Amino acid sequence: MHILAAEGNPVAVQLLPLVTTVVVFGIAFFILSKNVWPRITKGLDDRDNKIRDEIKAAEESREQARAAQAEYESSLKEARQEAAEMISKAKNDAKAAADDLRQRNEQELADLKQRAQRDIQTAKQQAVTELHSEATALAASIAGKILQREISVQDQQRLVEESLRELQPLK
Amino acid sequence: MHLLAAELNPLGHVMDRNIIGGPDALLMGDPHGTPIVTMHMLTLLLATGLLLWIMNLAAKAITTGPSSEGNDRYLTRGRMAQLIEVITLYLRDTVVKPVLGEKTNKYLPYLLTLFFFVLMNNLLGLVPLLDLQHIVGAFLGDSHFAVIGGTATGNLAVTGGLALIAFLVIQVHGLRELGLAGWAHHLLGGAPWYLAPIMVPVELLGMFIKPAALAIRLFANMMAGHTLMATLALFGLMALSGMESWIAGLGISVIAGAFAVAITFLELFVAFLQAFIFMFLTAVFIGQLSPHDHEHEHAAETAHA
């Protein structure tokens, strides 16, 4: 017990260290509040906000990407549909054009054939007529020479008609 | 014999001693004078200096860097800074915010300063500064030579000073938040008016007992831990010097040493725990004097009493 007394009483409170503590703590508080806590709080808050902002931005861009994809898909679908329409239209057009062409060709061919036939007919008739008149003249001259006389116009007419009748089947 | 006895007193490690002025002081020693500078005052200053230095470095690492660093400026580099950051974040978001709510930012600087101030002093007390100086002193002829060291928070005057600040913060907060009438009403503790003769003295006493309990809790924990450690360490010395067989003495000192190591780890934990409790209870007491539901607060009070 003697030693303890010599060393002093551990629960005795001295004013000096107490006041020192208050002052030192006050100074520490002042310096830390000015210099340290605002910076630490700022660091923590900035990072919090940064992370929150980044997550928000990521969510937004994901949403945007989803919308863009939907839009892209719908436009792709539209384009496909359009392309299909265009193809079918082109096909129809081509078919129509081909039909038109064929029809026109046929028409033209038919016209050509008709004209050719008509030409042939005309040429034939002309040839027959020419042959006819040639034959008539020939016949008349032969007959004149044979008869050594002039055939009257009436005779001649009659002869022509007779000859024509004979030639009729040639037509 | 007196020297050995003094050496064997485990309280030698926890007691304050006069450095300048007062009995047994190193400088201007005067058996009847008053101390001017004591060892714990110097330890307190050393701890505060270290605290300011470390916290400044940590703040530099934790705060948002220049924008030239890109996204790396949000990173905290360095283990010490990360440790401090994790503690700060935990104290702010998990401990103080649920207790103080929107008042958190107002009291956070004080509460964080309190926590780290106490923690730094507790931890510095675990550094065997005294013993290193004793070794130096042994060569100089005074094996008790020491200028600085010991656990400042193992001194009731130091914890008392911290409690005094806590008391002022709590009561000033209460008066400002509740007003004089609200503050007076709080002395009823939520009981009907006719219980005032019982409640008012109890609450008035409680006003002083709460911070006093803070002071005594911290002081007693630090004091007891270091006394226990010193006692264990002294077992070896006692066994070696007192026993006939040096083998038995060696055996005892090895066992005692192992226990002292284990207790040192416990002390490390207690250093954090007591700093946390001091700061947390201060936050709770501040929260109790805030103008919101009384029932809840007093439930919390009894839970922590």
Image (cartoon, coloured by chain):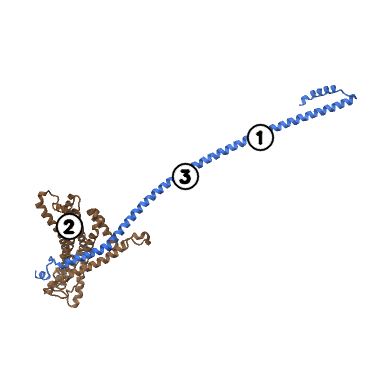
Which residue was labeled with disc 2?
A: B171
Count the labels in the image: 3
The foreground one among A19 and A92 is A19
- Name which residue lies at 54% across and 39% down: A89
Q: Nearer the viewer, mark 2 or mark 3?
A: 2
Q: Residue furthest front?
A: B180
**Which structural element holds mark 2?**
helix
Q: Are marks 2 and 3 on the same chain?
A: no
Residue B172 percent coordinates (x, y): 18, 58
- Disc 3 or 1, which lies upstream in sequence? 3
> Label 2 is placed on what type of residue?
Gln
Q: CA distance from mark 3 to mark 1?
A: 46 Å
Q: Is residue B244 visible?
A: no
- Name which residue lies at 35% across and 52% down: A55
Location of the C terminus of chain B by quadrant is bottom left
Q: Residues within 10 Å of mark 2 (few under 14, many from 20)?
A: some
Which residue was labeled with disc 1?
A: A108
Q: Colour of chain A?
A: blue
Q: Is residue A129 visible?
A: yes
Residue B298 percent coordinates (x, y): 16, 52
**Which structural element holds mark 1?**
helix
Q: Chain of mark 3?
A: A
- Name which residue lies at 22% across and 69% down: B46
Which residue was labeled with disc 3?
A: A76
Residue A88 percent coordinates (x, y): 53, 39
The foreground one among A26 and B53 is A26
